[in-house]
Image: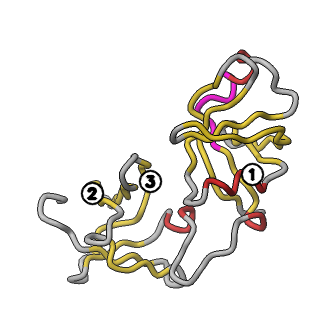
Amino acid sequence: MEKYFVIGKIVNTQGVKGELRVIPTTDDISRFELLDFIYIDKNGILDKYEIQNVRYHKQFVLIKLKNVDDMTMAESFKNFEIKIPADMALPLDEGEYYIGDLYSMEVITDLGERLGTVEDIIFTGANDVYVIRNDDNEILIPAIKQCILNIDIKNNKMTVKLLEGLR
């Protein structure tokens, strides 16, 4: 089974000619310009689409797909994720990781307490927020240097410092 990375979420249309308004979930939004095609995840079904044009507006990536030529057709993509195969991902530098690698990662505190696993990531304008769940509760931890002390992809473990008020 091939691994895919989420690189954006379609949040709306742009104009009447079928452009998609996308919130990028990748650090380097210029990576959209390097793509000839994308996959759109429609509730677990991946459909491949060729990219006709990419441009930027404010915090959004605007994507025009071939054969999606009007607003009505573009609206059918709203709230779906854009994915690419892992082999199309940009290479990482030392200490970098893909957001998809964080899901199901075990989370422990700097004092050794097991908090649970990363179940979701909330993309805010300022910083991401990791949703950590265990059998008893849910903790929201901001993805900032003061809280995230270490991410060990190889051992699937994240070490965090709980700032006052996070519990």
Give the mark nearer the N terminus: 1 vs 3: 1
Label 1: which secondary element = helix
Dot 3 amino acid type: Asp
Residue on which the image places disc 2 = 139
Residue on which the image places disc 1 = 33
Provide residue 27's location: percent of width, then percent of height: 55, 60
> Which of the pair 129/14 is nearer the observer?
14
- Residue at (43%, 57%) from the top-left corner? 119
Badge 1 crowding class, 10 Å Cα cut-off, few under 14, some 14 to 19, many 20 or more, is: few
- Residue at (79%, 39%) from the top-left corner? 53
- Residue at (82%, 41%) from the top-left corner? 51
Dot 1 amino acid type: Glu
- Toward the left, the furthest residue is 164
Compute the Cα span from label 1 to label 3.
27 Å
In this image, 47 relative to 10: left or right? right
Residue on which the image places disc 3 = 120
Label 2: which secondary element = strand
Compute the Cα span from label 1 to label 2.
36 Å
Q: Is 40 rendered above or below residue 79?
A: below
Give the mark nearer the N terminus: 1 vs 2: 1
